[in-house]
Amino acid sequence: MGRIFKRGSIYWIAYYHRGKEYRESSRSESEAQARKLLKKRIGEVANGQLIGPSEERLSFEDLAKMLITDYEINGKRSVDSARLSIRHLREFFGLYRAIDITPDRISAYVRARQEEGAANGSINRELAALKRAFTLATRAGKLNSAPYIRLLEENNSRRGFLDHGSFLALRDGLPAHLQDPVTFLYLSGWRVSEMRTLEWRDVDLAGHEVRLRPEESKNKDGRVLPLRGELLEVFERAREKRRPDCPFVFHDEGEPIGDFRKAWKTACKKAGLSGIIVHDLRRTAVRNMVRAGIPERVAMELSGHKTRRIFDRYNIVSNEDLATATELLQSHLNRTHRRPKVTSLSVRE
């Protein structure tokens, strides 16, 4: 099952696992220490829980490096989000070996993050990153097993949307350079990142359409947006502001549109709106398309939704929708309900 031998003054052990011989230094000049280590390894092999020297050396930082490398190699757009997750995980697990990151310690991490006020959705992104890192390590043969990581329950389905009057009031409160970009988001249902990276090479004003390049799409699928009505007017105004030194359709004095959450918050306050975020424009666009009678499959193509589940989350039912449905039902009952005609019959004696 195993043997002990010396290299210089240090005792080494050798043992077999799945037909392969493993050699490991005891880091000791004591034969007794070497026999103790060999007995431990043979026991781990017998129980299917071998923790070899490579596993013992694997650290959290090794896991983090494998994760980020995987994201970069595969060109994942969420690499920045993964780095943020790693930063939070590092504060807790930074000095840990991989084999020391146990389910109990993961539960302690979750508890600590909740005490910091982190939302379950944020914690889940971090747990998902950790889970992915362990998966990569096991696939690479650096670990024999990974700890069980259970995600938290999430209730992050927002119900935020704008009626047309509220949108107009909000838009009027924005700086001039943001009004057309925000109008584009409201009418198209595109993501903010897709608006920011839209270039003039993607626009065919003569053909009245815009093409989103696959590399700029979150789901890596390109799509076409026809330009009609106010959407076309937005691009005609953008053409008047076009600069030869700037490739972007929407810009701020030649610079790309940056983070405008502060300006958004100020405009919301002026319009008397609360709890509305920029992403609610995408939800609103989807809802408006469906209410306008656009077939849902076509609306999904315009907005870039690949899955029915996410689209249905955006196709929000409001209290007004429910009230309208009740009124329609009552109208239907009123039209179809007929009181039975009562005919008096004379009884002959």
Image: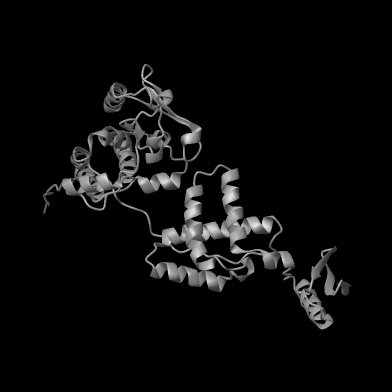
Q: Residue at left 29%, top 37%?
A: 182
Quarter of the figure with the N terminus: bottom right
303 or 64: nearer the viewer: 64
Q: Is residue 102 above or below residue 237?
A: below
Q: Is residue 185 visible?
A: yes
Residue at (25% x, 35% y) in the render: 179
What residue appears at the point 41 percent right and 34 percent down from the top-left corner? 197
Where's residue 273, x and y in %?
20, 49
Judged left or right of residue 176, residue 6 is right
Q: Is residue 133 above or below residue 178?
A: below
Residue 307 location in percent, x, y? 47, 43
Left-right relation of 18 to 69: right
The outermost residue toward the front is 8
Front residue (pair 343, 222): 222
Kindly give the residue lying farthest to the top in the view shown. Answer: 206
Q: Residue at x 37, y 16 (%)?
A: 206
Whole-percent x and y of residue 156? 38, 56
Residue 107, percent across and down? 50, 71
Foreground residue, 187 or 248?
Answer: 248
Q: What colour scheme governs how the chains and residues are painted in the rendered image of this protein?
A: one colour
> Which of the image's four quarters has the C terminus?
bottom left
Q: Quadrant of residue 183?
A: top left
For the residue pair 67 and 244, the one nearer the viewer reads as: 244
Is 113 above or below relative to 193? below
Q: Is residue 180 above or below residue 1?
A: above
| Residue 327 in sight here | no
Q: Residue furthest bottom?
A: 32
